[in-house]
Amino acid sequence: MSTDMTDAPPESGPEPISEPPSRRRFALDAKKLRVLGLLAVVMLGQGLLMLLFLPAPPAKPANEEASIAPDAAAGDLDLAMVEVPIDAFNTTNSRATPGSVIHVSFKLVALVAANEREPFAAAVNNSYEARVREAVERVVRSTSLEDLRDPSYGTMKRRIKSDINKVLRKTYVIEAVIRDFKTMEQ
């Protein structure tokens, strides 16, 4: 009678008891503890450096109702703005539609910081009056028909703002406001 070796247990002794796989995965030995400690020290150091080198948030004005936030192009800073009328404009545009002339009339108002109202008004109405007027008329004369028909006049206002600030050599104008805009094609 022969014995089948596959049915008999091996005689090498008792099997070692092993831990469940979930306990072995999270076991912390000295090497892992050192790595975690180093990581914690580095993160703490970065936090301290951020506190030292990042600027403090700007202080809010005491009366927040008096301040008005400018448009996104001007930034997110709270800033009191005032309207300063520039002038009424009547000009023509012959580039918008070839073979015809478009007469354009509107009133232009600039939004400027409240503390710069006086220097801006003096510059626009006295020192740089002719150059500001020429810059605005140049923008209107070179505007396309699509931009003249845009209900918000976004492109034209952006170009007017930019050109006025270039003439004045300082960023006074936060936003250009166009009122009573009329066009007539001939």
Image: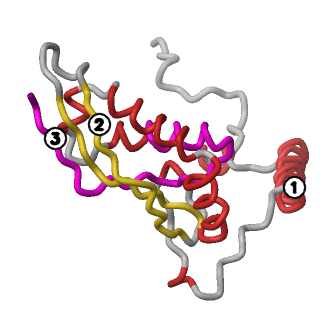
Q: Is residue 82 above or below residue 158?
A: below
Which residue corresponds to mark 1?
53
Instruction: Answer with mark 1 or mark 3, whichever residue precedes in sequence.
Output: 1
Which residue corresponds to mark 3?
183
Stretch in magenta: 159-186
Q: Residues within 10 Å of mark 1 (few under 14, many from 20)?
A: few
Residue visible at 21% across and 40% down? 150
Give how far across and how far down residue 94 sits, in percent: 23, 21
Task: Please indicate whether residue 185 sits to the left or right of residue 154 in the image.
Answer: left
Residue 18, visible in the rendered structure: no
Give how far across and how far down residue 29 sits, in percent: 85, 47
Q: Nearer the viewer, residue 39 or 165?
A: 165
Report the Cα–Cα distance between label 2 and label 1. Answer: 53 Å
Give how far across and how far down residue 122 sits, in percent: 63, 59
Instruction: Answer with mark 2 or mark 1, whichever residue precedes in sequence.
Output: 1
Task: Please indicate whether residue 46 sits to the left or right of residue 131 in the image.
Answer: right
The local secondary structure at tag 2 comes to strand
Report the Cα–Cα distance between label 3 and label 2. Answer: 10 Å
Residue positioned most to the bottom? 63
Q: Is residue 135 above or below residue 157?
A: above
Q: Nearer the viewer, residue 20 or 74?
A: 74
Q: Quadrant of residue 76?
A: bottom right
Question: Looking at numbered disc 1 in the image, what kind of residue is underneath it?
Answer: Phe
The local secondary structure at tag 3 comes to strand
Residue 43, visible in the rendered structure: yes
The local secondary structure at tag 1 comes to helix
Q: Where does the C terminus fall, quadrant-wise?
A: top left
